[in-house]
Amino acid sequence: MIIDSISADKKIIVNTKWLMINSTADDTTYPDTIALTDDALKARAERIPRAIAAAWNALPYQISITDEKCGEHLFTVVFNVEIVTAGPYHYAVNFVNVKTGNGIGVKFDANAKGITSGRSYVLSGSSRAKFNVSDPRTATDSNPKADTLEPHEYGHMLGLIDEYFEAQFNRGGVRYTYFDGSKEIAMPGNGGMMDNMRDGIAKRKRYALTIGYNAVRILKSNGIKVTKMEIVNGS
Ligand SMILES: [Zn+2]
């Protein structure tokens, strides 16, 4: 994450690099998948950064940060994903191509307990993810409708958790605490990108919280004490 506080147009730039790993060959680790060549997979994966930018930069998010030295400044948040096939990366993404079971799959991944073969996920606290390019909601197909899968998974990379209801993970809503101490509980079925994705774009104020707190942390490590941090837009 880069905080550009020098330019007139102040920005917080969130750069994420993914290493594309072709895991479309059917094996016990990733079953049910139909093989794609590296080139075919790359052509499909290349659609993802655009879909994430379209979903996450739509508002765009703006965060007001006040510190003791410089006063109040408004930062526009820019989300940027790049997919690489070599070199340094933030996330290693295993891509699969599972069309069975409505794209959710039938068999289970050998190394992820309870997760069916077609289910996309980001492992929290790790730099690993798995995406199914045949999920009906993927941005990797030529159908521009419902390109919400990867933008949702990207939210997990920003440190956000699922707001939807799933019996085994019933959290009774997801709790958020803003910088001023105010709280919000997001209940399942709210339509947000981290819930059932009805919104289509990321527009909930709370989704920018992890970015805002990270900015506060970075500024603190540079000796700048933030006294106020507020996400000024979103619903
Ligand atoms: Zn999720």
Image: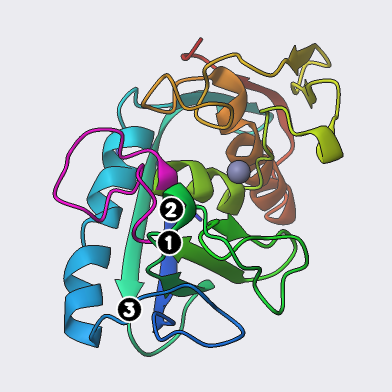
Earlier residue among tags 3 and 1: 3
Residue that mark 2 sits on? 103
Q: Position of residue 186 (x, y in %)?
A: 71, 17
Identified by mark 2, the residue type is: Gly
Name the residue located 85 percent from the left edge and 29 percent from the top edge: 171
Q: Secondary structure at mark 1?
A: strand
**Front residue (pair 216, 196):** 196
**Residue 77 is a magenta residue:** no
Mark 3–mark 1 CB contact (< 8 Å): no
Applied colour scheme: rainbow
Q: Is residue 3 visible?
A: no
Up the image or down, 16 lies above or below 64; here it is below
Residue contact between numbered discs 2 and 1, judged by CB atoms under 8 Å: yes
**Tags 2 and 3 in contact by the CB under 8 Å rule?**
no
**Residue hosting label 3:** 84
Residue indicated by mark 1:
132
